[in-house]
Amino acid sequence: MSAVPSPAPTSGEGVHFAHPSEEKLAELLDFYGVRWEYEPVEFVLSWDEHGRPTSAFRPDFFLPDQRLFLELTTLRQELVTRKHRKLRQLQALYPEVSVRLLYRRDYAHLLQRADLAGLTRRVGASGPPGERARESA
């Protein structure tokens, strides 16, 4: 079993999110002052007969102060099913790792709450995503 860390991007390097919803979540985390890292660890889930990784899972965010990984799922149900399978594998191989799956409805609820508080109009105005939270680290 192994987890492969990768250097978390810094604000100077910029962050290239796989999906716009990940960028928006990072902006919300920044607004609330929650420190985060984007895809810092890849967890190997299976290996071939020679010990080479054949399947892995890289959660979208790690919240170091909460020691929690977040995986955002706003896509098709078939992808959600695949992520559920990978999460079960991850929990079996790495029981010490905490991962929370945020579904489309969870994400929509967060955005709605932020909008009600007037945050979405201000989010993004204070610089690149991740900059404020990483600077306070």
Image: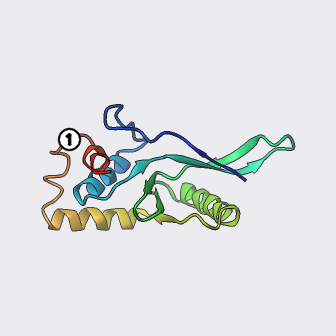
Q: Residue at x 61, y 62 (%)?
A: 87
Q: Looking at the image, is 96 positioned above or below residue 19?
A: below
Query: In the shown orientation, is residue 74 left or right of residue 82?
Result: left
107 and 137: which one is in front? 137
Q: Position of residue 45 (x, y in %)?
A: 70, 53
120 and 9: which one is in front? 9
Amino acid type of disc 1?
Gly
124 and 81: which one is in front? 124
Q: Residue 112 lies in what quarter of the image?
A: bottom left
Q: Residue at x 35, y 45 (%)?
A: 20
82 and 125: which one is in front? 125
Q: Residue 62 lies in what quarter of the image?
A: bottom left
Count residues near mark 1 (Cα–Cα under 10 Å), then give few for <14, some for 14-19, many for 20+: few
Q: Residue at x 69, y 50 (%)?
A: 2
Residue labelled with disc 1: 127
Q: Position of residue 35 (x, y in %)?
A: 34, 55
Extreme-right residue of the structure: 49
Query: In the shown orientation, is residue 93 left or right of residue 15?
Result: right
Extreme-front residue of the structure: 137
